[in-house]
Amino acid sequence: MTRRTDRGAGAVADSPQGRGHTVAVVVPEPADAARLVELQPPGAEIAVVCLRAGAKDGRAALDRSLTASDGRAVAGPRVLGVDGTDDPATVAALLDALGDIAPDRLHTLDPDPVHSSFDKATGTPAYDVPAAHAETAAGVLAAARAWQTETGRPLSVDCHRALSDLRFGLDACRRYPTPVNWLSAGFDGRLTAFLPTAAGVVRNWQDAQGRWSGPEVVEGPGLLPGLLVLPDPRGLPHLFALRRTPRGDGGVDVEVVHAAQYRTGPGSLTPWHSLGGPNAADWRRGRAVGFPAAAFDGAGTLFVFVRNFGHSISWRCRPADGRWTAWQHLGGARVADDLVAVTAPHGGVEVYGRLRDTAGVVRWSPGHDGTWTEDRTLPFAPRPGTLAPAPEPGLVLFRDLHTGEAVAWSSAARTVLPLGAPEGTGPLATARGVDLDGWSYSVLLTSGTDGTGRVGAYPEGRPDTGTWWQDLGTPTHTTPAATVTRTGRLTAAAWAPGGELVLAHREERPGALAFGAWHAARG
């Protein structure tokens, strides 16, 4: 095994970021691993686990990928010789392998792939990928949950969409997106950080003296490895995810779930509440539901949107009286999994979806009578996995499909606004209300292609004036986050290898956006 000694820029006091980022790639056969190996970042230590030896050409493809892994340490493939379902023997073999690897992150396939066709006569979806892909992913998720429960060590998981385009990087291939804006500030200025893991959502939080507690795993059997964190009009975080539950008849139910945190502290997250799904009447259709997007309108109504089985958009909402409406369908253009919902300048909610069959975006917005209007004329195309809400109403963030540059779209001005940072990857996180020499600024955060976090800033509401960027000074393999407390304090955060939370606070320097030394969030 060849090991990389350069672990990236930045230094974190008393944290594990000096060690490698260990990635386990777990798939049915070597041919399935080749694509996933190519997506791993420089500096990663990759261990490949295959359930079966596979065919000769598949082993050769994996060998080529491992040989081309410049700047990455590689080991494997390790062949387990099991059938790939989620039966006890397979889970036990996978659990042993994970014990040997001790990964920080695990990559596998999609347990609920998107169908390619549908037989209306029998009600049966057809798929372009072997059934072993979904079966293996289900077994891997079960083993990953068991390993994290036994060790107490947070394990992040990525499930890869079949036939996704490797040119656009890891975020374009994720079935369940990693969260942006996962750092939240309570009324009293105490912070909470959320991380989706194999065993559920992990929380770290501050006590009244500013000391950190956690990680605490929020109970949620069957939660899939994705998370949306959305602040309500009072700034309190609401969480959305997908939950996968085996059925007695051999099928699975996949449903949208919602929880909220109304205070900072241990056990403060509400129980997960099921919102079902738009195709819940038939589990074979319902399992294909896309990951949720959500937003609050100016009146405090909570809207939730998903991509449905037919690849259009479905939605339901909870008005101020607290009673959820039924799922309704928007129809219209066929969309991919990428959705983002934002509050519009007029106080309503808009939802954007990346088109499935062509490069572009569709936007839906409600009129004064509540009727939704579809707009397919938007003059931009985002990279898969990069649509995100901007800090200000009416703005959407993404990366340009062709250049990778960070871009904002203004629905009011119908203008595309370049934000720079072409070297970054994935969606952008945000914070607003950052005071700089008496002016209010919005802050953007991203992970660079070299695994180093970056931060940018522009005058709030004026991304057209230009964004200046600088390194955050810490390695991170997920999008960093930041938040501003009610007292105006800006804090940036990132997840270190092993799931440890690290933080840096803004230093007050005239004319500068500077952060102090990064440190581990400990009591």
Image: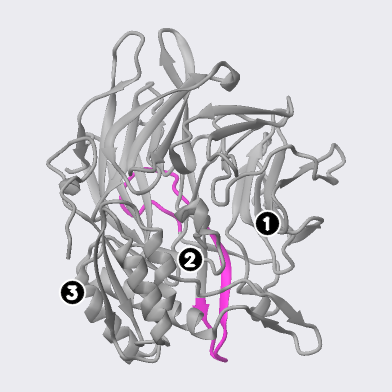
Relative side of 427 to 497, left or right: right
Structural distance between the alpha carbons of marks 1 and 3: 46 Å
Relative side of 287 to 370, left or right: left
- Estimate the x, y position of residue 390 in percent, counting from the top left: 56, 34
Towards the viewer: 431 or 416: 416
Q: Secondary structure at mark 3?
A: helix
The residue beneath circle 1 is 324
- Estimate the x, y position of residue 1 in percent, counting from the top left: 17, 66
Q: Is residue 262 shown above or below 136?
A: above
The residue beneath circle 2 is 160
Q: Secondary structure at mark 2?
A: strand
Q: Which residues are magenta?
A: 245-270
Towards the viewer: 319 or 104: 104
Residue furthest to the left in view is 14
- Which residue type does callout 2 highlight? His
Q: Residues within 10 Å of mark 2 (few under 14, many from 20)?
A: many
- Estimate the x, y position of residue 14 in percent, counting from the top left: 12, 41
The residue beneath circle 3 is 100
Lower position in the chain sequence, tag 1 or tag 3: 3
Q: Per the image, is 262 magenta? A: yes
